[in-house]
Image (cartoon, helix red, strand yellow):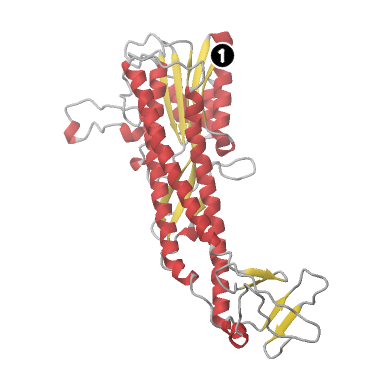
Amino acid sequence: MLARNANEALQRNRLDDQMEPDACVRRFHIHHPTPESMGVFILNAKNSELCVLRDFFWNHIRGQKNKASIRFTPGNGGRTFSLTYHIPSFVLRTVDLLRDDLPEDCRKRTDRSPWRKSRKLSFLCTDMQPDAQIVDILHKTQHSFTVYGYNKSIWTSNYPIDTYFYKHDPDNPDTVGFYVDDPNDEEDADADAEVWDPSTIGTLEAHKVVLDPCDYFLIVLLERYKQWYEEWMNTFTIIQRRISIYFETHTATMVTVPTSKESARKALTYIEKSRQWLKQTEELLELLTRTLRAIITSWNVFKQDDRVYFPKNRGIWSSHQQIVNKVKELADVLEGFLDLKDRCRHFGKNLELDIGVQSGPVISLQYLNVTFYFDIREGEYGWIKPENTVNVDEGGFMAGFGLDCLAIGSSDPKRKAFHKGSQSRA
């Protein structure tokens, strides 16, 4: 929203306007807010509203630096109130870079970094062709909403929301224009154009009287929880598919035992690449699970606040119960992400089959934890098999694993270390 549009909205009559049945209540939906548009709202705020708006917009700009929160705050000695939530989140979009530009947030901080960062997940798209330009992009988003005022009759709401990751504004359900019917449309030629409330994703009419600010707050929160669930479910589905494809295509390679130097080198290269992929994937899953858990926790903390009371009237209680159900569905998505983390952890254990000798990686001898015992005697060298140990074929042991030499240290200072070359006994 441009500063000019924000100023025009603020100049509209609020009280004693017969053309506005809900003139004592103002609802502002600010898609892709800029510092200039936020400044217009702050400069036009009353003294009782200034503190609320200043903190509200500042926390919206901070975004992911804040924890997810939903809270009720009384002000001015209990003469005013505010209901506010700040929800940092993510959306995942698959972009064809040959046809579409990479969406980026053009709003900058003082250090020239964007308000919301986008992250390419190229490492996940292992099923794509090497020259393919289709890539998954994870976008940071921030949902902030506040309802503040004096009582149930006089209050204001503000909803700044990020929309930079949408391709085209006409397809963006978070813009005001998306909910305005075109009066020139032949189907609506005989009817007045209706405007729907974008903060509720079109659930309410923009000019419909809302009697209770708490009711409105819960309606907005409910519709947004539905939206968050769809986005998180989409993110989980895509990432789960990418990870499953990687596991399916790499498990066969992983269990192949090296039989020569060349195969050992290939296996080592595979292990290093898989470790890098696993590190990036685990970092991604940790980020997503931490963010989603915070969203779920924010509601649980809010409903346990002693100052928050949900009267059991039809509207408010219905919204409350639906939010509870939607939070449970988000918890199921979280469990799915945690399961992916467990699968990655199990996959990582199979990559720990190499050992380090003098800080250098060596392919493991076998997949079982078997200890080889060698008894080294003065003046007598050879393979000695103590009781309950493993017998090793001297001729085929080193050649079979592509080893030039075998070095075995001794923790007993009275015993000598053992070294065997390809053509030597000791």
Report whether residue 205 is seen: yes
- Dot 1, how many residues are within 10 Å of its Cα: few (below 14), some (14-19), or many (20+)? some
The percent coordinates of residue 304 (x first, y second) are 50, 22
Could you tell me which residue is drawn at 58 percent across and 82 percent down? 261
Could you tell me which residue is drawn at 27 percent across and 26 percent down? 194
Q: Between residue 238 and residue 189, name the one nearer to us.
A: 238
Q: Between residue 298 and residue 103, name the one nearer to us.
A: 298
Q: Between residue 250 and residue 258, name the one nearer to us.
A: 258
Task: Quadrant for residue 389, please give it.
Answer: bottom right
The percent coordinates of residue 336 (x first, y second) are 43, 46
Could you tell me which residue is drawn at 77 percent across and 86 percent down? 380
Q: Quadrant of the N terminus?
A: top left
Report whether residue 118 is seen: no
Q: Between residue 323 and residue 173, name the one nearer to us.
A: 323
Could you tell me which residue is drawn at 53 percent across and 55 percent down? 345
Most distant residue in the bottom direction: 423
From this view, report whether residue 233 is shown above or below residue 156: below
From this view, report whether residue 11 is shown above or below residue 284: above
Residue labelled with disc 1: 75
Q: Quadrant of the C terminus?
A: bottom right
From this view, report whether residue 322 is shown above or below residue 335: above
The percent coordinates of residue 295 (x first, y second) are 48, 35
The percent coordinates of residue 330 (x first, y second) are 41, 38
From this view, report whether residue 419 is shown above or below residue 50: below
Most distant residue in the front direction: 387
Q: Amino acid at mark 1?
A: Gly
Answer with left or right where residue 342 lies relative to residue 153. right
Label 1: state its secondary structure. Answer: strand
